[in-house]
């Protein structure tokens, strides 16, 4: 069972400049069960105002269900959702301070761009005279000034996405929910729109909650990444924290690449553990019960090959399986006592299959994972 | 050679089939312009005398107007009710949805005669006189399953997402219907109306049982035929046929026109 405690999340958000005191979106004990199968369980989450939050997870992990419950489209089986201190669990989507940008944008094909963007204004009975000005402002904000008279089918995918954004922003939501908004765009466009989304979030100062399965996208956009896996929150924190100090083995593997060395805890105490592994006993900071299973995760760029510096721990001698030159680094696969390791070595460090490497790693760059 | 024979064979079968379907109609239309009172070849004419006689006949003209009114009202009634039933079942998924759908489709298997007799017995029981309102009600009852089926078939997941978006943007349930669902479904709604209109337009048996002294056009034609063959019947039949054909064509043009636009959009 994975419950991310408050202290973890506060630690994760502390570095974000715009995070205000107190939590904006508060989720407590949230769960959703479909016919006995738990799609989501025990979700605890606190999000500060004005943050770019990314819900990241593989498909079927429950991240979209979580977004859908925040938006009010899915009724939770248990738990509470509060926005700005107000309980919204029982409110329908229209009465929540949220707006959703749907995966396929859900633009109305029978209306012009203008009429699409003006839709939330019309539904709120904003004076007719005021609508054109606000529509123009919103279109301008997303870089579509002058596109008002076009029909939806005359727009490209990227333009449709911006119309959906402009329309959702005219709801003036406290929280903008984005369901895989870049999924339908090609790679080049996706990177461009990512930058625009981030800039838009900074300019509007609103909280964005964005669902994706693309960890690169999450890294680019997020102040706070929430990793969802098997219907539970696996970990949550800044991209940097999640990459450098993943909380679980799943996070270590899902966010970038890692070499994993498994073993049994031989001794533990005073904030350190000694792990008995096929590569010998390795001692590092961590907490566990003696006798439990554990894993050491090491990022490819943290390996040291060659003479061991004084502050590093010897791991063992590995044989190179293959190596690929990637410009900035060599990407090397090596084997040590039957365990496959992944390394990134400096470009001047050419190796070829069969070479032997003496590997070591600094203690602070090894992560002990107890699950 | 074999190919030519194949084409000829296919052509012959097609000619037979379409001849079987359309020849009676062609004969009906042709002899409405026939000069003699008896519809016997060879054709002599053309003349519009029978049309003049038809338009001068107040009994037939009244029946024509009544039929149009009943067709419009019952067509609208069936379409609105069928649409609402389909919307409710598709979107709100009530308990026992399968049962409700089955009950809505059941009248398809009930002969119009049974509906007519049933309504007649009911009206007698309630001491209601036979009337055009009862005929309209009967037409709504037999056409509702058709309108329901057409609407239900068009209730796709795509519109559901759009309806959900509209709700998220602040639309009330009524505005979701009027601003999103109906505008998106209007070709289906119009097609449903056209079909219900034509079915009501040439429906005989329910009208026969339930109309009092004021009869509909098909009943008026039937009464005329009892008095003996008259080319005015051909003229009236031709008008019935042309109106039905016109409605079907309009429906088709709207549906196909929309599909072509949709195809262009897919190309983009």
Image (cartoon, coloured by chain):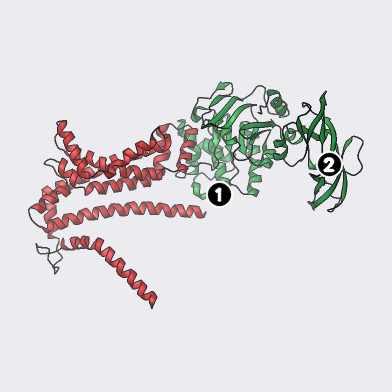
Residue drawn at x 16%, y 57% as measured from the top left = B235
Position of A76 compared to B109: left or right?
Answer: right
Discs 1, 2 touching: Cβ within 8 Å: no
Location of residue A72 in the rendering, given as x and y in whole percent from the top left corner: 52, 30
Q: Position of residue B62 (x, y in %)?
A: 14, 46
Query: Which mark identifies residue A303?
Result: 2
Quadrant of res B142: top left
For the point 46% across and 37% down, the residue is: B163
The colour with which the image depicts chain A is: green
Q: Quadrant of the N terminus of chain A?
A: top right
Q: Residue furthest left?
A: B227
Cα distance, mark 1 to mark 2? Answer: 45 Å
Mark 1 falls on what kind of element? Answer: loop
Q: Residue at x 14, y 53 (%)?
A: B55
Q: Secondary structure at mark 2?
A: strand
Q: Colour of chain B?
A: red
Q: Position of residue A228 (x, y in %)?
A: 64, 34
Vertical order, B243 against A11 (above or below): below
| Crowd band around label 2 with a 10 angstrom C-alpha radius: few (<14), some (14–19), many (20+) | many
Q: Earlier in the sequence, mark 1 or mark 2?
A: 1
For the C terminus of chain A, the quadrant is top right
Q: Is residue B73 visible?
A: no
- Could you say which disc has been placed on residue A44 in the image? none
Report whether residue B109 is seen.
yes
Out of A125 and B114, give the one closest to the viewer: B114
Query: In the image shown, does A130 or B81 lie closer to the viewer?
Result: B81
Q: Which mark is residue A156?
A: 1
What's the chain of the residue with tag 1?
A
What residue is at 87 percent from the left and 46 percent from the top? Answer: A357
């Amino acid at each position: 069972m994975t419950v991310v405690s408050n202290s973890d999340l506060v630690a994760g958000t502390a570095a974000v400049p715009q995070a205000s005191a107190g939590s904006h979106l508060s989720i407590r004990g949230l769960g959703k069960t479909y016919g006995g199968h738990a799609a989501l369980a025990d979700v605890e989450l606190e999000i500060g105002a004005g943050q770019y939050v990314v819900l990241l997870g593989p498909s079927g992990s429950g991240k979209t269900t979580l977004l859908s419950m925040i938006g009010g489209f899915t009724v939770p089986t248990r738990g509470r959702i509060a926005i700005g201190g107000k309980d919204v669990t029982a409110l329908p989507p229209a009465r929540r301070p949220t707006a959703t940008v749907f995966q396929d944008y859900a633009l109305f094909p029978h209306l012009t761009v203008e009429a699409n963007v003006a839709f939330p204004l019309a539904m709120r009975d904003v004076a007719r005279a005021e609508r054109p000005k606000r529509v123009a402002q919103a279109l301008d904000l997303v870089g579509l000034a002058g596109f008002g008279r076009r029909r939806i089918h005359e727009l490209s995918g990227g333009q449709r996405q911006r119309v959906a954004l402009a329309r959702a922003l005219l709801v003036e939501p406290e929280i903008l929910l984005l369901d895989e908004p870049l999924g339908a765009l090609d790679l080049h466009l996706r990177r461009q729109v990512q930058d625009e989304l981030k800039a838009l979030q900074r300019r509007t100062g609103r909280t964005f909650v964005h669902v994706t399965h693309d960890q690169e996208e999450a890294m680019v956009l997020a102040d706070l990444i929430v990793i969802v896996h098997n219907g539970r929150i696996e970990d949550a924190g800044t991209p940097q924290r999640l990459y450098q100090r993943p909380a679980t083995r799943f996070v270590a593997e899902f966010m970038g690449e890692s070499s994993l060395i498994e073993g049994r805890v031989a001794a533990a105490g005073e904030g350190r553990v000694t792990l008995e592994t096929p590569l010998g006993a390795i001692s590092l900071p961590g907490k566990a019960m003696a006798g439990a299973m554990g894993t050491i995760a090491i990022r490819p760029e943290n390996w040291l090959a060659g003479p061991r510096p004084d502050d590093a721990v010897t791991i063992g001698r590995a044989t190179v399986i293959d190596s690929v030159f990637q410009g900035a680094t060599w990407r090397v696969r090596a084997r040590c006592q039957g365990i496959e390791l992944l390394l990134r070595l400096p470009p001047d460090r050419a190796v070829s299959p069969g070479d032997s490497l003496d590997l070591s790693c600094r203690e602070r760059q090894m992560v002990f994972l107890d699950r | 050679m074999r190919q030519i024979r194949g084409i000829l064979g296919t052509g012959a079968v097609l000619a037979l089939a379409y001849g079987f379907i359309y020849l009676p109609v062609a004969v009906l239309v042709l002899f409405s312009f026939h000069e003699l009172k008896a519809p016997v070849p060879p054709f002599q004419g053309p003349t519009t005398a029978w049309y003049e006689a038809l338009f001068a006949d107040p009994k037939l003209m009244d029946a024509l107007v009544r039929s149009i009114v009943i067709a419009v009202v019952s067509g609208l009634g069936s379409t609105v009710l069928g649409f609402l039933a389909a919307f409710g079942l598709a979107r709100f998924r009530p308990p026992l949805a399968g049962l409700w759908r089955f009950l809505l489709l059941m009248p398809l298997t009930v002969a119009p005669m049974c509906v007519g007799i049933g309504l007649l017995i009911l009206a007698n029981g309630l001491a209601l006189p036979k009337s055009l309102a009862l005929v309209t009600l009967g037409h709504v009852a037999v056409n509702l399953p058709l309108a329901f089926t057409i609407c239900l078939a068009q209730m796709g997941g795509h519109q559901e997402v759009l309806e959900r978006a509209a709700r998220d943007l602040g639309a009330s349930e009524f505005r979701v219907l009027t601003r999103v669902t109906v505008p998106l479904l209007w070709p289906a709604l119009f097609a449903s109306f056209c079909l219900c209109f034509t079915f009501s337009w040439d429906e005989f048996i329910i009208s026969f049982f339930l109309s009092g002294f004021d009869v509909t056009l098909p009943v008026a034609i039937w009464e005329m035929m009892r008095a003996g063959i008259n080319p005015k019947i051909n003229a009236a039949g031709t008008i019935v046929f042309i109106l039905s054909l016109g409605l079907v064509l309009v429906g088709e043009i709207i549906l196909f026109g929309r599909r072509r636009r949709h195809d262009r959009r897919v190309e983009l």
